[in-house]
Image (spheres, helix red, strand yellow):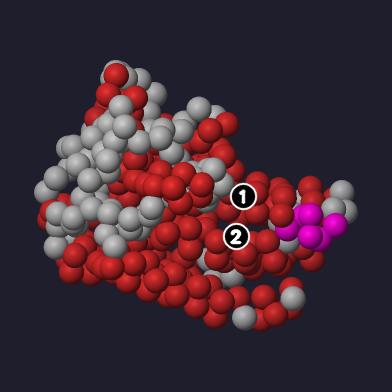
């Protein structure tokens, strides 16, 4: 099994990406959750071009990527899981869960540090919310994210199998929970006990600061509940809520590639930070929403 995953890693990852992307794209057409406000052709063209650009940059800077680091770490016997001789199947499960937790912490961090928020706001400035939003990140944030991933692989001694599975799961879940899809409320309630659903994560893309700074998880939903960052619904409801960032509503700046790439270098740090807790909870938070 391990040899198969390693030998076919690239094919498996690409196959999973295109399969999930196609499934979500079709689902969005058949059963959309919201009406889109910006030209889909423009958004998709620029968001997906950014994906290609990020892939090329990562391949140039990190030819071996996370799987290469995991292979080296495993052969060298580095990391906690290798040091304590944890059985393979337990090590794989532990590594996937711990890496998911680190992604949660990283997500909180890029909201908490104004300099990192400059990079991360590229993801949030998208004025609509669909499967391509889950792939939309600034190249510098992608590089920093990869370095963090390398670090946890080394410290943890994550097995190669765990890293491959985690990469596939993370990419698939990012596209799933950014989908503009309508899940039955009963299904959403059951699923979000375990994983992050589109309705759960959409709250995180609200223009309202207190809503943006909630629901940081990408895969497992438990972290938001454990650390008090869970929010059930947006105040305005999913069909009426405004997506994006209040101060960035120019489509040329936030929906076209030149503006997207320059976005971290405009504006002021004082515009936004998670630790400026100047939000006011409203009684309407408790009312049932659409």
| Magenta stretch encompasses residue 91 | yes
Determine the main secondary structure of the stretch shown in magenta: helix
Q: Residues within 10 Å of mark 1 (few under 14, many from 20)?
A: many
Q: Eyeballing the image, is 284 above or below 161?
A: above
| Magenta stretch encompasses residue 143 | no
Q: Is residue 39 left or right of residue 14?
A: left
**Of 227 and 45, the residue lying toward us:** 227
Residue at point 52%, 58% (across, down)? 170
Q: Are marks 2 and 1 in contact (CB under 8 Å)?
A: yes
Residue 120 percent across, percent down from the top left:
36, 45
Q: Eyeballing the image, is 217 above or below 280?
A: below
Magenta-colored span: 87-92
- Residue picked out by circle 1: 99
Q: Quadrant of the C terminus?
A: top left
Quadrant in the rendering for residue 181: bottom left
Residue 14 percent across, percent down from the top left:
49, 76
Residue at point 11%, 49% (across, down)? 250
Q: Is residue 106 left or right of residue 262?
A: right
Helix, strand or loop under label 2 = helix
Q: Indicate which disc, 2 or 1, sits on the residue closer to the N terminus.
A: 1
Residue 82 percent across, percent down from the top left:
82, 54
**Of 193 and 257, the residue lying toward us:** 193
**Of 179 and 42, the residue lying toward us:** 179
Helix, strand or loop under label 1 = helix
**Of 247 and 198, the residue lying toward us:** 198
Q: Residues within 10 Å of mark 2 (few under 14, many from 20)?
A: some
Q: Is residue 221 visible?
A: yes
Mark sitting on residue 166: 2
Q: Is residue 207 visible?
A: no
Residue at point 62%, 50% (across, down)? 99
């Amino acid at each position: 099994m391990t040899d198969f995953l390693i030998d076919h890693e690239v094919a498996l990852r690409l196959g999973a990406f295109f399969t999930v992307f196609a499934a979500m794209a079709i689902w969005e057409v058949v059963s959309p959750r919201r009406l889109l406000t910006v030209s889909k052709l423009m958004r998709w063209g620029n968001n997906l071009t950014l994906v290609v650009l990020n892939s090329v940059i990562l391949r140039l800077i990190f030819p071996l990527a996370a799987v290469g680091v995991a292979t080296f770490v495993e052969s060298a016997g580095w990391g906690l899981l290798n040091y304590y001789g944890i059985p393979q199947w337990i090590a794989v499960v532990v590594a996937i869960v711990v890496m998911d937790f680190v992604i949660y912490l990283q997500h909180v961090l890029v909201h908490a540090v104004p300099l990192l928020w400059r990079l991360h706001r590229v993801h949030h400035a998208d004025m609509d919310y669909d499967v391509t939003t889950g792939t939309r990140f600034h190249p510098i944030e992608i590089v920093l994210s990869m370095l963090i991933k390398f670090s946890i692989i080394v410290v943890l001694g994550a097995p190669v199998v765990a890293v491959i599975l985690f990469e596939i799961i993370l990419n698939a879940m990012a596209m799933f929970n950014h989908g503009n899809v309508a899940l039955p409320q009963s299904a959403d309630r059951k699923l979000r006990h375990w994983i992050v659903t589109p309705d759960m994560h959409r709250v995180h893309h609200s223009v309202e600061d207190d809503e943006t700074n909630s629901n940081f998880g990408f895969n497992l939903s438990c972290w938001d509940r454990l650390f008090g960052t869970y929010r059930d619904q947006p105040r305005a409801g999913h069909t009426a809520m405004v997506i994006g960032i209040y101060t960035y509503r120019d489509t040329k700046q936030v929906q076209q590639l030149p503006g997207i790439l320059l976005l971290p270098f405009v504006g002021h740090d004082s515009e936004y930070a998670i630790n400026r807790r100047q939000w006011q909870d409203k009684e309407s938070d408790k009312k049932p929403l659409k």
